[in-house]
Image (cartoon, grey):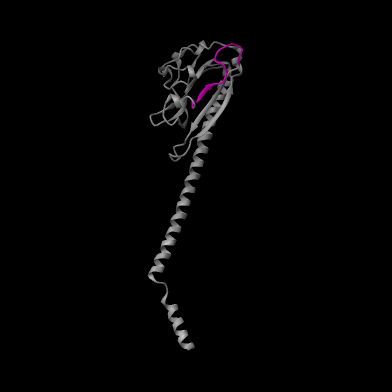
Amino acid sequence: MSRLRRRIASREREQGFSLVELTVSMTIFGGLMAIITAVFISSLNQSRDALARADSADSARLAISQLDAQIRSGSVINDPSLEVNIALTGVPPGYSVRILTERGGVQNCVQWRVYLDGDNRGSLQFRTWPAWTPASVSDWAEVTTGLVGPETPYDEADASTHQPFVLVTPSTGDSVIKSLAITLRVKSAGTREEGKPVLVSTIVTGRNTIFGRGGLECDNVPAA
């Protein structure tokens, strides 16, 4: 009897797995591999997006630091909401700002703008000209790229809450220190389309604006 049992057990061990068992096992293994691969790809994309956002945000902060230095040494900050002549700015109100800066003891007019293309992507640009002489205006220089606007480009209802430049103190009146709020929406081209832009913002105060200059030095704005 024991011999018979040993033979039966030996035959059962030699039989191995059935086709159904192999199919089920391979299906489970394939599903697990698909899940692991999807998680790995998702983590890789998230890491890439985070690095791209960090690089773009750092670039935007460096650009803002240049604008910061000009504003702090400036004596006039024109109200960006009053920049309504698109022929002179190339952008809607709130997307450009003119300042009279006196860095190095020289009066220069500097105009900054966030310029967006038809795909709602763009860059931070600036140009300069000596005070009173707009004929000597420089070409627009690109400081940083990877900027985006509101969901609908130049939609006034939406753009009013996402304007890059906003004067946060009165635009008129003498002996008033004026401050400018700067907000850049940054989204690197290396990020996925569904990724949210990074907001880089600051408020800069023009120390010399307290002298209450009229700003006529930069009123003759050259065409964009």
Q: Nearer the viewer, residue 75 or 27?
A: 27
Which residues make up the magenta segment? 162-176
User: What is the x, y in percent for residue 44?
Assistant: 48, 48
Q: Which of the image's four quarters has the C terminus?
A: top left
Vertical position of residue 189 compared to residue 217: above or below: below
User: What is the x, y in percent for residue 62?
Assistant: 54, 30
For the point 51% across and 23% down, the residue is 165
Is 169 inside the magenta-drawn segment? Answer: yes
Tell me which secondary structure the magenta stretch mostly adopts: loop
Q: Nearer the viewer, residue 27 or 179?
A: 27
User: How many numbered circles are shown?
Assistant: 0
User: What is the x, y in percent for residue 195?
Assistant: 46, 39
For the point 50% across and 15% down, the residue is 130
User: What is the x, y in percent for residue 145?
Assistant: 46, 31
Is 135 inside the magenta-drawn segment? Answer: no
For the point 43% across and 30% down, the residue is 122
For the point 47% across and 89% down, the residue is 1
Q: Nearer the viewer, residue 162 or 41?
A: 162
